[in-house]
Image: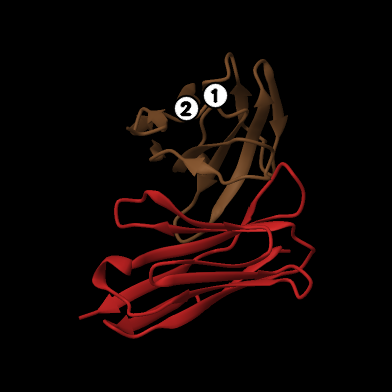
Amino acid sequence: GDQVEQSPSALSLHEGTGSALRCNFTTTMRAVQWFQQNSRGSLINLFYLASGTKENGRLKSTFNSKESYSTLHIRDAQLEDSGTYFCAAEPGYQNFYFGKGTSLTVIP
Amino acid sequence: EAAVTQSPRSKVAVTGGKVTLSCHQTNNHDYMYWYRQDTGHGLRLIHYSYVADSTEKGDIPDGYKASRPSQENFSLILELASLSQTAVYFCASSGTGGADTQYFGPGTRLLVL
């Protein structure tokens, strides 16, 4: 089965609002990485976390390895935030398991 | 300047033909990876390498071979391309085995007819 369960699968936000994306893990993970895939298909690094919380502008991510989840918070959403967001978690040192993504649409 | 580049960016291949996808990184990273992405899904690991002249199988290696002739270059080879291998292929590099951020190339869109 899938080791990374990502939710929601799709999300619509009005500009200026915010929400949280979540990844649950079915096995212990040592780190997680979050990406945005833009309309051209490029994968943009957002965060890499081995623990705790990181923040960058309007984005904040938390990784709780004990409770097996990670979240990505988006605040004050802008049109350019539209895209698909993926989390990828690593159980060991040589592999990442990707979630199926959250498709985010920001509405003017 | 892009640190992970892939070529070609898109390709149409015939069933049973041989396809080689190339990846080049200027990050001075030891680890390189090949993933495939199918429409509406996340990425799945095909092969990876942590040193030149050595490759390892990922989660879905069947039907694919990999080659790492140098630290900078990593190729994915489809000896007998099949319809099911139509996908977007991404190459990535990282400084250490999973204990570091992965940096992705722009992807190669492969269509097998």
Q: Which residue is mark 2?
A: B25
Q: Amino acid at mark 1?
A: Phe
Q: Which residue is mark 1?
A: B74
Say if A88 sits above or below A61 in the image: above
| Nearer the observer, B15 or A55 | A55
Chain of the residue on which disc 1 is drawn: B
Chain with colour red in the figure: A
Is residue B92 shown left or right of residue B7?
Answer: right
Residue at point 54% right, 69% down?
A61
- Position in image of residue A28 (x %, y %): 79, 63
Quick one: SS at disc 2?
Answer: strand
The chain letter of the brown chain reads: B
> Callout 2 environment at 10 Å: few (<14), some (14 to 19), or many (20+)?
many
State the residue at coordinates (52%, 38%).
B92
Q: Quadrant of residue B100?
A: top right
Q: How is the image coloured?
A: by chain
Which of the two labelled residues, at mark 2 and mark 1, occupies the earlier sequence position?
2
Which numbered disc, 2 or 1, marks the residue closer to the eye?
A: 2
Residue A80 x/y as whole percent: 27, 66
Chain of the residue where label 2 is placed in the rendered structure: B
Please name the residue shown 25% across and 71% down the image.
A79
Q: Position of residue A51 (x, y in %)?
A: 68, 63
